[in-house]
Image (spheres, rainbow, N blue to C red):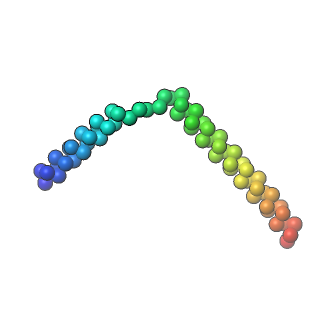
Amino acid sequence: MNQTVESIKTYFKGVKTEWGKVSWPEKKQVVFETMSVVVIVFVFTVAIYLMDLLFKSILGLIK
């Protein structure tokens, strides 16, 4: 039991050490990349919606 507790403590000490080595991006970069993702998702959503309307109308002519 004691060895398990020591292993857990060692693990979290290592996590704390590695956490300090992480290089975090600046807020400006995070905001830009987040907005880029939102815009790309929006564009693809609109494109898929328009293709759906197009295919629905084409299939409506066949029926």
Q: Residue at x 32, y 38 (%)?
A: 18
Q: Nearer the viewer, residue 49 or 10?
A: 10
Q: Nearer the viewer, residue 57 or 30?
A: 30
Residue that protrudes farthest toward the right in the picture: 61
Whether 62 is drawn above or below 27: the answer is below
Residue that protrudes farthest toward the bottom in the picture: 63
- Please indicate whether residue 46 sits to the left or right of residue 4 in the image: right
Whether 50 is drawn above or below 13: the answer is below
Q: Residue at x 84, y 66 (%)?
A: 60
- Please indicate whether residue 53 sits to the left or right of residue 20 in the image: right
The quadrant holding residue 36 is top right
Residue 16 rendering spot, x and y as whole percentages = 29, 37
The quadrant the N terminus occupies is: bottom left
- Please indicate whether residue 50 sits to the left or right of residue 25 in the image: right
Q: Nearer the viewer, residue 22 or 54?
A: 22
The quadrant holding residue 24 is top left
